[in-house]
Image (tube, rainbow, N blue to C red):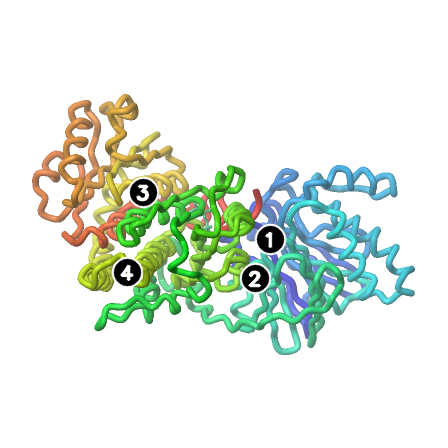
Amino acid sequence: MCGVIGYVGKGASPEFFFLGLKRLEYRGYDSTGIAMVFDGKIHVQRAEGKLINLHEKLQHLPSRANIGIGHTRWATHGRPTEDNAHPHVSGHIALLHNGIIENYREIKNFLQEKKYVFLSDTDTEVAAHLLHYEFSLEQKNTSHNNILAMKNAILNVVKTIKGTFAFGIISSLIPDVLFTAKYASPIIIGLGENENYIASGMTALIDHTKKMIVLDDYELAILKQDSYEIFDFQGNKIEKNILSVDWSAQMLEKNGFSHFMLKEIFEQPEAVAQSLNSRIDPIDYHVFLEELGIKNTNVLLFEKIQIIACGTSFYAGLLAKFYLEKFCCLTVEVELASEYRYRYSTSNNKTLVIAVSQSGETIDTLQAIKVAKENNAQTIALVNVRGSSIGRICDDESIMHAGPEVGVASTKAFSAQVVSLLLLALGFAEKRKTISKETLSCNIDNLLKVSSYIEKTLKESDKINQISQKLVAEKSVLFIGRGPQWPIAMEGALKLKELSYIHAEGFAAGELKHGPIALIDENLYVICIAPKDAYYEKVYSNIHEIKSRGGKIIAIGFEGDKDLESISEHFIGISPCEEIILPFLTSAVLHLLAYWTALNKGCDVDQPRNLAKSVTVE
Ligand code: AGP
């Protein structure tokens, strides 16, 4: 949720931290700050609201320093004010934090008895003062070896606090060393030339280095200009793999699009192609599970599949269920991670649990997969970020290859998730011999057509923009679909509400008569997903039920479906195609509908209010 950036090296300006935080601002935040050590002193500037409010204060910071930290805060404890913004200072120490300290009250009481004075309502300030207190004790124990004193002090702090954390720490007593430690919240270390970095996401460092280390839970790092050491929380030194990140800074720019979200919607054909690339043999019709990252999973062992995820990723899982069950002939349960993790678990060693997460950092999904592992399930992480927390604890990590997704609303990652899950379904079925060669080849051929079909669908963007203007003033909108289009209806509703703040609800069309039809009147728009698939006749009847009660129809159907077009207020045509291709087209239409509605309403489409790209706090 929060953005973290840190630097130690030959010298960095306040702009360095500012631009690093800009790279992370898509994660959602409501205050921000930078601290630098210069001339034996801590210099801090913080601001409420967006980064632009901090920019005008950069002139009050040293123009260049060898060490510093920056933070964008998504408020948990304490309102989003300047006083509550990070970094927080305690004497010679400045500290930033991503996470939640659950036992901060009792620690605060202890520190107040030690005469510490608190200037904020945050849990993070407690960590800053506690670290200062522990450091003062350790200075005596280490005969003033300040680096060792700070290392020991951090190890004492992380043993004392309960909750989640990613800390960035600097001290005016140790002006050439940057410290970090984490549990559950992400920390990436970047290795540069005579400079090293920390960040909460690779996108903040991609302009400076492609050599990165992903810190794992219960690890502490001590970075100098030209060296680094990593320790576990018992103080033992450990070695870590150095990743070479294959993203470019260019991929992170908007490339001429007005918003990251629009760029990423139009990148869906490429994202689908990348997800397919090198994972299928289009001649002999095979799926290469190893290329999908499946190396340790015993594909013949599991008797049930559980997919756990949140939000849009959950809807990708719900859609994939139709195909996993059909191709693999087994039960597939799709679970909200935030529910799965607290419920009695039926997972066991005959269960395959697939965690679907674009960021790979969603705390509910991360904690849910830990429950699955405690129950001896086999686990696969389907993620977009290599080396993410979820990927690191699963038996196998499958990268969806959507490329960096910056917009808070997930679009191309959704398409990449669906492709990857369909490939897993076909690959499992091929290995378990539950699918004929003909069915395998037919579905591989259809998946190879998806990118071009999406490209054609995206050409409807201007028409969808026109239609979206009918929704701008609406208070509520319904979405209906059947079969694989039911999860798409819910995904479309999620996108509309999270981007335009219009209430929206998606549900199975067959459920209309079980209650929701009471909502229908002449003031209500209903988005009806009605391609000529196996469910068409039923959905067509549902549309008549809506119309006969005055409801206003916006239909998504096959081009040339004059019957459907004639009973709709507005009609969006998609190319007739095989069922497995359809969800990619209908979701692309609904992503565009949500984008244009939000934009026409004047909403912030890349950073919707209250939302974050990665929900790393509970
Ligand atoms: C998607 O548009 C939403 N921003 C949100 O529902 C998201 O899908 C959810 O938070 C899960 O994120 P993840 O895929 O990174 O785990």
Q: Residue at x 83, y 62 (%)?
A: 149
Q: Where is mark 4, residue-wise?
A: 433
Q: Where is mark 1, residue-wise?
A: 185
- Residue depth check, mark 3 versus mark 4: number of the one nearer the observer: 4
Residue 70 appears in the figure: yes
- Distance from label 3 to label 2 (Cα)? 36 Å
Q: Is mark 1 within 8 Å of ligand 1?
A: no
Label 2: which secondary element:
helix
For disc 4, the neighbor class at 10 Å (few under 14, some 14 to 19, many from 20) is: few
- Distance from label 3 to label 4 (Cα)? 28 Å
Label 4: which secondary element:
loop
Mark nearer the N terminus (3 vs 4) = 4
Q: Nearer the viewer, residue 536 or 396?
A: 396
Q: Quadrant of the C terminus?
A: top right
Q: Position of residue 257 (x, y in %)?
A: 35, 59
Label 3: which secondary element:
helix
Q: Which mark is residue 20?
A: 2
Q: Position of residue 394 (x, y in %)?
A: 51, 58
Mark nearer the N terminus (3 vs 1) = 1
Mark nearer the N terminus (3 vs 2) = 2
- What's the amino acid at mark 3? Pro
For disc 1, the neighbor class at 10 Å (few under 14, some 14 to 19, many from 20) is: many
Mark nearer the N terminus (2 vs 1) = 2
Q: Which mark is residue 487?
A: 3
- Whether residue 378 sits left or right of residue 419 in the image: it is right
- What's the amino acid at mark 2? Gly
- Residue depth check, mark 4 versus mark 1: number of the one nearer the observer: 4
- Whether residue 254 sits left or right of residue 455 in the image: it is right
Q: Nearer the viewer, residue 390 or 311?
A: 390
User: Residue 181's quadrant in the figure?
Assistant: bottom right
Q: Position of residue 128 (x, y in %)?
A: 75, 50
Mark nearer the N terminus (4 vs 2) = 2
